[in-house]
Image (tube, rainbow, N blue to C red):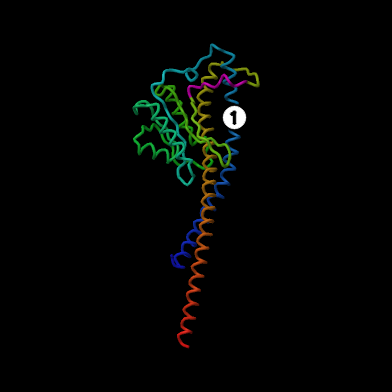
């Protein structure tokens, strides 16, 4: 049996760990509230661009753009969104597992795909496995601005327009609720879900619909990347909050067990001392 001092030391160290996990839980909860608001607010902007594009594409069959046309897939680009650190439960591992499984199922050579990694965990994962990495972003803010990822989003879309890749897929955690995040795999380009969108307003275009489409389609694809990043950040804060709450609860349970062990050990020590005193008194009679 461990000594009283050993048990007390474990209680003290667990209590300090509990203070840290509780603080991290509260910080993540605070960040989650703002991240969730940002994701919902940005969705209105993305939906409006999609509506305008749908209005042009549905009313004018003569208007075409390479981003709307599917071609033979010789090389695929994957954007993965992870965190810069761990302590977020299965948040990072779910995305990385999905990427690895997709690559294993679809590709036989590294020439058939490339990865654009957002987040240190994703960057390290790809480099350790010698996966081809076209671009990286590390050190995003907890509430990322569009300017932080504009370059990587623009470059990813440009790779498709230059036919360096034939499709662009993003893998990220979609925010469902504070306790639920679901890994999503969405094809960004070619854009294929326009026909399902119904325009709620009529528009007049100047200078021409084709020129507007040429500008809007890359912006729309970039907006999808940024929207996915906002969803992923909300998911990250939620996952970390849940993980830290679980750690705090486990610390409470461990402290209770250790306290019970400490009391039993102290009781045994007291009983032993009483027995020795009684035995000593009896020996003197």
Q: In this view, does 64 lie above or below 13?
A: above
- Label 1's element? helix
Q: Which residue lies furthest to the right in this view?
A: 201
- Residue sitting nearer the eye, 170 or 5: 5
Residue at the farthest bottom position: 285
Look at the image and say whether residue 193 sits in the magenta stretch.
Answer: yes
Crowd around label 1: few <14 · some 14–19 · many ≥20 (10 Å): some
Counting from the top left corner in percent of width and height, residue 135 is at: 40, 33
Residue 226 image point, x, y percent: 52, 33
Measuring from the top left, give residue 60's x and y in whole percent. Answer: 57, 13
283 lies above or below 106: below
Q: How many labels does the image show?
A: 1
Q: In which quarter of the image is residue 72?
A: top left
Q: Identify the magenta region.
A: 189-198
Magenta residues, dominant SS class:
loop
Asked if the magenta segment contains residue 34, the reply would be no
Residue for badge 1: 45
Quadrant housing the N terminus: bottom left
Q: Position of residue 81 (x, y in %)?
A: 47, 36
């Amino acid at each position: 049996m461990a000594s009283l001092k050993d048990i007390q030391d474990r209680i003290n160290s667990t209590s300090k760990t509990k203070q840290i996990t509780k603080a991290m839980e509260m910080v993540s909860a605070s960040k989650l509230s703002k991240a969730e608001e940002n994701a919902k607010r940005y969705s209105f902007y993305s939906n409006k661009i999609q509506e305008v594009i749908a209005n042009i594409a549905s009313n004018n069959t003569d208007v075409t753009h390479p981003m709307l046309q599917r071609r033979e897939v010789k090389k695929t680009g994957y954007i993965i969104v992870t965190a810069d650190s761990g302590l977020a439960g299965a948040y990072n591992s779910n995305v990385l597992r999905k990427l690895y499984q997709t690559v294993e199922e679809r590709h036989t050579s590294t020439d058939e795909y490339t990865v654009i990694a957002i987040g240190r965990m994703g960057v390290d994962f790809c480099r350790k496995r010698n996966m081809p990495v076209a671009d990286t972003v590390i050190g995003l803010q907890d509430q990322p601005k569009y300017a932080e990822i504009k370059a990587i989003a623009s470059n990813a879309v440009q790779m498709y327009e230059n036919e360096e890749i034939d499709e662009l897929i993003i893998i990220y955690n979609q925010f469902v609720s504070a306790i639920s995040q679901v890994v999503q795999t969405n094809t960004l380009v070619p854009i294929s879900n326009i026909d399902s969108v119904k325009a709620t307003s009529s528009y007049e275009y100047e200078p021409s619909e084709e020129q507007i489409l040429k500008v809007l389609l890359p912006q729309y694809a970039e907006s999808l990347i940024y929207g996915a990043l906002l969803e992923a950040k909300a998911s990250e804060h939620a996952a970390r909050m849940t993980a830290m709450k679980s750690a705090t609860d486990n610390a409470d349970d461990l402290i209770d067990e250790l306290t019970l062990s400490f009391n039993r050990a102290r009781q045994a020590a007291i009983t032993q001392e009483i027995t020795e005193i009684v035995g000593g008194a009896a020996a003197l009679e």
